């Protein structure tokens, strides 16, 4: 399947502004998966070495113009007289659509896009991936690459599409991808060309934006491609202030502070509303150093750090605004949801739901399908999952072990050796030799119902220690 770039008409001028940033940090690295970036238009201080995935040995110079326009919106162009939204950022051009001389342009496919996403994370060390393009279908490879980025703390931003209808484009339609549409000139709805679908998260400017062509000449553009660049720049600005932000927190900050238009709350026309970087920045600064809101999580309790991590990363919130309920039993639905969120909310590959007690409208619908396809857990029968059934300590440790691809123990576990041969024995050996039960201050009891405090400690210990 070929990818479709959202090229747009060149029209007039719009000045970009951004709020002053108070903190200093390492420049945020943004992968621009596009047509390349012109070093004539973009300052060399804003560029780092990338790669041309279309023509072996070719440079990452922009032969088409789309990538340079995207880059200009993010960091600006002195040549073109354009101020970028995040001029501190460093861009990594990763070329997947290009042309060689007078030859026709060559586009990458979805398998190549998946590989480039992984390289942006593993090879080029980017914190944000800007994909101002998309395809009408998704693939397991693309889903996995997007999930990998999320797990590694890298935000993916993509566009809604320019068809003016309800066509969904991938990767923008994935739940962990921040999907940008374009706001209309009157700021009361999406632009006529901006697609409307359930993947849309935000609207951003994308009409008559002043930007640059590869020669460094000022031009103006329209399209969700450029709204995507706007959102990537807003995310980079937040990361510049707080480099510890996770993709979840960035999405939360931008979506929760967006200026709501249209129907109250979320709607497919406008997502959560129009991105408001100043409001997001103010919320970020207000929340800096804010104490944990839960009255039932003491400062010196063994699970406090894990609860703080779980809250910050969207693994789980409280049972109320002021309570976490650490001793409350976890259900099967809650457990697989916590695991799914910790894994980066990956889109399940399977779409057929065999369980009569799991509805598409349930918060645990995708987590259950993901857990089923990964072999983390199956139903309690061929047609039931029993989502509200309590989870035992044995089940939780086993689910976590399976979600980690069944790793080996770090040595001999006396605890596991005394259990006998059960489905959970190898999982307990792994957890015991890596100190999970010590971290949770518990003597493992396989039939004991597992409390919320234990599962967040187990998750935090497994991810923080790299197990």
Image (cartoon, rainbow, N blue to C red):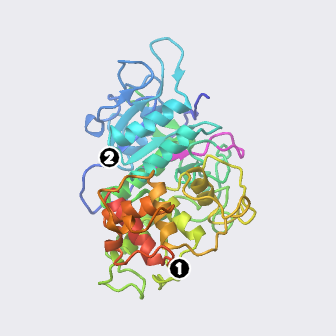
Residue 444 in the magenta stretch? The answer is: no
Residue 272, horizontal then vertical, whole percent = 59, 62
Q: Is residue 87 above or below residue 43?
A: below
In terms of image quadrants, where is residue 81? top left
The label on residue 329 is 1
Q: Name which residue lies at 49% across and 45% down.
A: 146
Q: Is residue 417 above or below residue 129?
A: below
Tell me which secondary structure the magenta stretch mostly adopts: loop
Direction from residue 195 to residue 426 in the image, left or right: left
Q: Give the residues in magenta.
A: 155-168
In the rendering, at what x and y percent does residue 191 appear? 64, 48
**Badge 2 or badge 1: first in the primary sequence:** 2
Q: Which mark is residue 89?
A: 2
* Quadrant including the C terminus: bottom left
Helix, strand or loop under label 2: loop
Q: Residue at x 43, y 77 (%)?
A: 453
**Magenta-drawn stretch contains 165:** yes
Seen in the image, is 172 located left or right of residue 235? Answer: right
User: Which percent across, then down, holds residue 108?
Assistant: 52, 26
What residue is shown at x 44% (from left), y 22% (from top)?
63
């Amino acid at each position: 399947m070929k990818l479709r770039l959202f090229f747009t008409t060149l029209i007039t001028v719009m000045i970009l502004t951004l709020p002053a940033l108070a903190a200093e940090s390492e420049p945020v690295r943004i992968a621009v998966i596009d047509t390349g970036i012109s070093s004539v238009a973009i300052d060399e201080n804003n560029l780092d070495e990338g790669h041309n995935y279309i023509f072996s040995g070719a440079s990452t110079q922009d032969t088409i113009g789309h990538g340079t326009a995207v880059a200009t919106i993010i960091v600006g162009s002195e040549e073109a007289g354009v101020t970028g939204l995040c001029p501190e950022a460093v861009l990594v051009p990763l070329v997947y659509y290009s042309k060689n001389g007078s030859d026709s342009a060559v586009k990458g496919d979805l398998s190549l896009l998946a590989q480039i996403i992984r390289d942006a994370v593993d090879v080029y060390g980017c914190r944000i991936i800007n994909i101002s393009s998309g395809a009408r279908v998704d693939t397991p490879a693309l889903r996995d690459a997007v999930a990998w980025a999320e797990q590694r703390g890298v935000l993916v931003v993509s566009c809604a599409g320019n068809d003016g209808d309800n066509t969904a484009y991938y990767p923008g339609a994935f739940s962990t991808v921040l999907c940008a549409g374009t706001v209309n000139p009157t700021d009361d709805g999406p632009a006529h060309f901006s697609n409307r679908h359930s993947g849309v998260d935000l609207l951003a400017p994308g009409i008559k934006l002043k930007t640059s062509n590869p020669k460094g000449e000022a031009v103006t553009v329209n399209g969700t491609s450029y709204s995507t660049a706007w959102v990537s720049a807003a995310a980079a600005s937040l990361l510049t202030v707080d480099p510890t932000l996770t993709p979840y927190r960035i999405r939360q900050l931008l979506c929760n502070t967006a200026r709501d238009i249209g129907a109250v709350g979320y709607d497919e026309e406008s997502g959560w509303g129009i991105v408001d970087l100043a409001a997001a920045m103010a919320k970020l600064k207000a929340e800096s150093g804010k104490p944990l809101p839960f009255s039932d999580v003491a400062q010196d309790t063994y699970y406090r750090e894990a609860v703080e991590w779980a809250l910050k990363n969207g693994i789980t919130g409280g049972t109320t605004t002021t309570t976490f309920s650490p001793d409350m039993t976890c259900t099967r639905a809650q457990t697989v949801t916590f695991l799914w969120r910790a894994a980066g909310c990956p889109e399940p590959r399977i779409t057929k739901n065999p369980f009569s007690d799991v509805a598409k409208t349930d918060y645990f619908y995708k987590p259950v399908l993901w857990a089923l396809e990964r072999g983390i857990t199956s139903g309690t029968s061929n047609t039931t999952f029993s989502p509200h059934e309590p989870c035992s300590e044995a089940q939780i440790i086993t689910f976590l072990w399976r979600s980690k691809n069944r790793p080996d123990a770090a040595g001999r576990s006396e605890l596991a050796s005394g259990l006998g041969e059960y489905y959970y024995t190898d999982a307990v050996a792994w957890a015991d030799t890596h100190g999970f039960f010590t971290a949770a201050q518990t003597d493992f009891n396989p039939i004991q119902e597992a409390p919320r405090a234990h599962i967040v400690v187990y998750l935090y210990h497994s991810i923080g220690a790299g197990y």
